[in-house]
């Protein structure tokens, strides 16, 4: 099993997806892989999410599929049973932190302030989602966190896009960024897989530091 930190090091961009039709999940996963992205967060914002997770987990080799928007322990158990290899939450509760500690699945909860980071650290965590990154101060907040929380790493999510991702990735305490822009729901609905692949390639070029692609 990977640690939460290792999960955030799989790729510099984690696509955050809402999949309405589980039958499309495998094609979407291949579209991401063709674009060079081998990790995806399927959020529990649709009824199809769990089926989508299990299809990708069973059918797509080399894709690290995880669950997002997990806000209680029942959901944690459900996505784990479906095959999620990591679990992301917009925030944290003590019951989720307790549950995650006993589970073998890496947990990456959301933090929005110093107290959240400290609570997570009490449970031995050192990798968090910063959420909603842009609203809670973005790069300035990450810079401020690097003082007191030297060993802590983040995945900023919420308001990240092709124009600002490089600024986030330049921060030494950022391992990757997350976002919906790279695999938007309208492209999923319309089955525009080639466009999803194009967005992934564009994102990775910018992530690697070539801003001409944006
Ligand atoms: C999430 O839950 O991670 C966010 O909704 C993603 O935010 P974005 O749509 O601004 O990328």
Image (cartoon, rainbow, N blue to C red):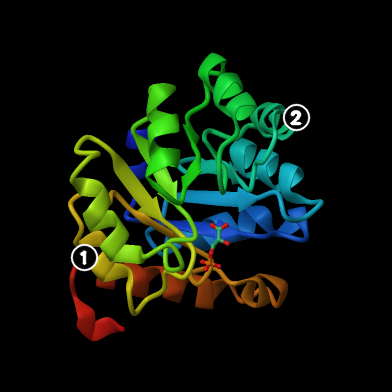
Task: State which quarter of the image contains the C terminus.
Answer: bottom left
65 displayed left or right of 46: left
Q: Is mark 1 within 8 Å of ligand 1?
A: no
The residue singled out by tag 2 in the image is 74
- Neighbour class for label 1 at 10 Å: few (<14), some, many (≥20)? few
Question: In this view, which residue lies farthest toward the top?
Answer: 102
190 displayed left or right of 38: right
* Of callouts 1 and 2, the N-terminal one: 2
Residue 6, x across and y down, in percent = 33, 35
Q: Is residue 184 above or below residue 106?
A: below
> What SS does tag 2 mark?
helix
Q: Are marks 1 and 2 in contact (CB under 8 Å)?
A: no
Residue 20, x across and y down, in percent = 76, 61
Residue 36, x across and y down, in percent = 37, 59
Task: State which quarter of the image contains the N terminus.
Answer: top left
- Neighbour class for label 2 at 10 Å: few (<14), some, many (≥20)? few
Label for residue 208? Answer: 1
Q: Nearer the viewer, residue 131 or 184?
A: 131
Quadrant housing residue 34? bottom left
Question: In this view, which residue lies farthest toward the right?
Answer: 47
Asked if residue 9 can be seen in this view, the reply is no
Asked if residue 90 can be seen in this view, the reply is yes
Q: Nearer the viewer, mark 1 or mark 2?
A: 2
């Amino acid at each position: 099993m990977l640690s939460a930190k290792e999960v955030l090091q799989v790729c510099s961009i984690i696509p955050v997806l809402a999949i309405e039709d589980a039958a499309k999940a495998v094609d979407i996963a291949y579209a991401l892989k063709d674009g060079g992205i081998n990790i995806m967060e399927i959020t529990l914002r649709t009824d199809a999410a769990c089926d989508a997770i299990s299809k990708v987990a069973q059918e797509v080799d080399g894709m690290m599929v995880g669950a997002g928007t997990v806000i209680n322990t029942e959901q944690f158990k459900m996505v784990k049973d479906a095959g999620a290899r990591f679990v992301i939450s917009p925030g944290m509760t003590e019951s989720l932190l307790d549950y995650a500690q006993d589970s073998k699945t890496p947990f990456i909860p959301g933090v929005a302030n110093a107290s959240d980071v400290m609570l997570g650290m009490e449970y031995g965590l050192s990798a968090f989602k910063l959420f909603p990154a842009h609203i809670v101060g973005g790069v300035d907040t990450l810079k401020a966190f690097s003082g007191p929380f030297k060993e802590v790493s983040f995945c900023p999510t919420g308001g990240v896009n092709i124009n600002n991702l490089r600024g986030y990735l330049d921060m030494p305490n950022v391992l990757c960024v997350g976002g919906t822009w790279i695999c938007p729901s309208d492209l999923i609905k319309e089955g525009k897989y080639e466009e999803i692949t194009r967005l992934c390639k564009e994102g990775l070029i910018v992530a690697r530091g070539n801003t001409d692609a944006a």
